[in-house]
Image (cartoon, coloured by chain):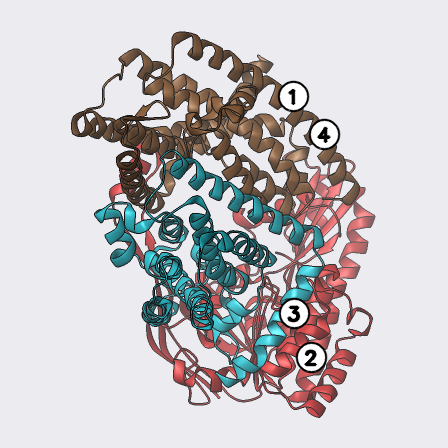
Chain colours: A cyan, B red, C brown
Amino acid sequence: MLKELRLYPKYVAMSVKSSLSYKTDAILQIISFAVTEAVSLATIYLIVGAVPSVGIWTFEALAVLFGFTLIPKAIDHMFFDDLWILAYWAVRLGELDPYLTKPINPLFQFLAKTFKWAGAGELVVGVVIMCIFAPQCAIVWTASNTIAIIVCALLGMFVFTGIKLLFASLAFWVKSSGVILNTVYNFCNYAKYPVRYMGKAFMSIMFYVVPFGLFLYYPVELLITGGNVWWAALWSSIAAVVLITLGLFVWHRGIRRYESIGN
Amino acid sequence: MIQLINVEKHFKKPVRGKGVWGMVKTLFSRKYTLVKAVDGVSFDIADGEAVGYIGANGAGKSTTIKMMSGILTPSSGEILIDGKRPYKSKERNAVLKNIGVVFGQKTQLWNDLPLTETYDLLKGIYDIDGDEYKKRLGDLVELLDMKEFLSAPVRTLSLGQRMRADLAAAMLHNPKTLFLDEPTIGLDVLVKRNLIAAIKSIRAKYNTTLLLTTHAMSDIEQLCDRVIVLDKGKILFDGTTDGVKHMFGDKRNITVMLKAPATPDALLRFGFAFPEASDDLMQVKFTVDAEKQHVNEFLQDVLGAFRVEDVKIVETDIEEVVRKIYEDGVTDNASGDAETARVVDNAGNDGATVEDGE
Amino acid sequence: MKAFRKLKIYSAFTKANFLLAFAYRGSVFLWLLGGLLTAVMSGLLWWAVFSFGGSDAIGGFSYPQMLLYTVLSAVCAEVIYCGTADEIARDVRNGMIGMRLSKPISYQGMQAASAVGNFSGKLVIVGIPMMTIGTLVAVFGFGLDGIQWYNVLLFIPTLFLGMMLNNALGFMFGQIAFKTQAMWGVLSMTDLFISFLSGAVVPLSLFPSWAQNILAYTPFPSVMSLPVRLFLGMNSWEQTLIGLCSSVFWIVVLNVLGALWYKRSVRHVVVFGG
């Protein structure tokens, strides 16, 4: 573990250096994700805009929620994007070989080698949207809820990573689990709606079946209604611990079934 | 010391139907066939030995190497490298610290960065001491003649350069054992010769144990004292390199394309080389045993006797050796339909006139 | 005779891609499962929106219509998705494009033929079953009316044109692959862009009217909005006819533009050696 932590900055530096030889690509990636998020925000605007107003959720409040959901997703995207590759083709094409022959955690090597600029773009978009709309929402900022919301964002990253690891590792059984992961992952989009007001079934699914409502929606709801954001942080940390543990467990079981390629 | 004790590796393969209806049925079936890629393999390799591990495509060579280097877990049996199992998470790191692996078709280098960056990272991964690292890298750069491309991004290297760089990466932490899986694949003759020479000098310097898979018999001859032949997951032969050569001989298939049809007379004169002419007599294939006959002289004679347009020489390859051993026949004439097909196939490639079989 | 032989070559690509749709048995079931979950969530989402709105119709859609629209557009999105741009990106990345260039058939034609096969395969394996189930649920479970057999029949050729449009757009966007390696992000952006503007994400009638007016002069509504609204019986004959003409017009225009752009891209390959 210590060796991994010590080497991590080196990996990130190498990955950043690598990506600098493709500057256009990095810029294109950032633009792609900015446009994608703009379309996503427009979708919410069109759907929710079709009705007068939903409880406490004015458009400004929804925009703050939207901005917040991007932040944990973006941080995960920057550092752990290769889980998508694991899900879609690394297992099928035997791309894990080189990481398994080195005396250091293979999952660590696989994930540490890629840094995604698009995630950085997404992070900036999220923070900017929050900064624009938060002042229009009558939020009372205290030291406590500011720290709590930042903690929630960081914990949220781990929940995202845990979910991705869990479902990407299923690829060891089904060869390509990208479709499953994509389905589950996209549930995060529903956390951008006023979850509590969308009916009992919708709310229950988002809070109890998939945890996206818990760690993406709930902190912002507490923030806007003036509740104690630390409750959301507590739930987020539980979700993070459970999902990361599950994800690691499935990965470890799966890697023993790994078949490489050429048979 | 490497020990393999009755190692097996099975893969499940889904059964696929043929045609449209078969495809539809496949949608709903969960049938598998069990493929035994490695089927009860046992051998020991002593420290400092150099072993060629050969067999046809799909014989299970790569699967064995992958089990020995921590990539795959055996279905049954045991692999012990200095008493430890590379596929057990607790013993893994101890084993991997002492082995180096190169896969000819895959690189472990960072594509967009200079080599030195990858090496520097490996220094951290293997906890190589700073002075030790400098000295070793210096030695390897010299042995493998890498000075000129040390600071170029890996993606700009030629295949031969990349191969040498990968070899250096695998040797950087001074492993006791080196696994090379098809290191010469795709390299042209000259580059290949240099690489083999470099591996030789590395072994001479560090006394590394070597396990090598290849398709080219000449690689084995030059590097290994011992050969293990694998077929369909089982060991077919385990003995000295000389033994294999003796069993089989060192055959060359020489195909000449002619400007004018060959005359029966001329063909008869070369009867000792088992000529096989095409129907229009414009192409003749000879099989020569290089141990009994100078290929050079033979070629001179042929060029004198026929009006030759082009010549192809194909060295015997492993597939042939395996087939020979399998058929248990040590006859002199190694010709057959399959072989003819391959030679014609080789003739279809442009480029070098003299080349190794696949 | 020569034309016939050519047709045979192209139809080989069609057949291969048709069969390919059957090869991914695991992913078909998974996709159905994913689609089902998404349909449930969207249904719940729209239910909430309708109950907040307090009116029976939003953007001209009743709740059951909106429900079926959501399901149909999700299914159709999968059926008409032909991966043309991804394919080009892959050919460029692994240098296959050079080999493709040396073949005596048109690369664009090959892509279109593959897309047709892909479309037919997916239509059989996911499209028709899912659309049937979705329609039955909407009609008998939610009291949807207005589905006419002639509209359903006309729907398939209209969707086919939508797919051809999507393929032409994909061929154009695929040319970006000649300029960058970062195609994954670019393609997910262009896919979302096309599906958003074609009404696959939100019905176009919910867009502000200025946006609707602009979109009417673009190829996008014909990709998705036109066939699905036709299926639901929400288009007048006049709208359908104009829509079909505009589809054909855009298919021709976009393919010509794609061919011109491709010619330029290929020169790029020749210069850099692929």
State whether residue C163 appears in this view: yes
Of tags 1 and 2, the one toward the viewer is 1
Closest to the observer, B300 or A181 = A181
Residue at image position (76%, 78%) is B141
Q: Residues within 10 Å of mark 3 (few under 14, many from 20)?
A: many
Residue C263 disc label: 4
Q: Are marks 1 and 4 on the same chain?
A: yes
User: What amino acid is labelled 2 in the image?
Assistant: Lys
Of tags 1 and 4, the one toward the viewer is 1
**Badge 3 sits on which subunit?**
A
Residue B9: horizontal and vertical position, in percent? 36, 68
Asked if the residues shown at circle 2 and circle 4 are in contact, with their CB atoms under 8 angstroms apart, the answer is: no
Of tags 3 and 2, the one toward the viewer is 3
Q: Earlier in the sequence, mark 1 or mark 4?
A: 1
Residue at image position (55%, 72%) is B244
Q: Give how far apart the Cα atoms at labels 1 and 2 are.
A: 59 Å
Q: Residues within 10 Å of mark 1 (few under 14, many from 20)?
A: some
Q: Give how far apart the Cα atoms at labels 1 and 4 are.
A: 11 Å
Is residue B207 toward the left or the right of residue C129 in the image?
Answer: right
Residue C232: horizontal and vertical position, in percent? 32, 20
Q: Quadrant of residue B118?
A: bottom right
Asked if the residues shown at circle 1 and circle 4 are in contact, with their CB atoms under 8 angstroms apart, the answer is: no
Q: Residues within 10 Å of mark 4 (few under 14, many from 20)?
A: few
User: What amino acid is labelled 4 in the image?
Assistant: Lys
Closest to the observer, B49 or B120 = B120
State whether residue A90 appears in this view: no
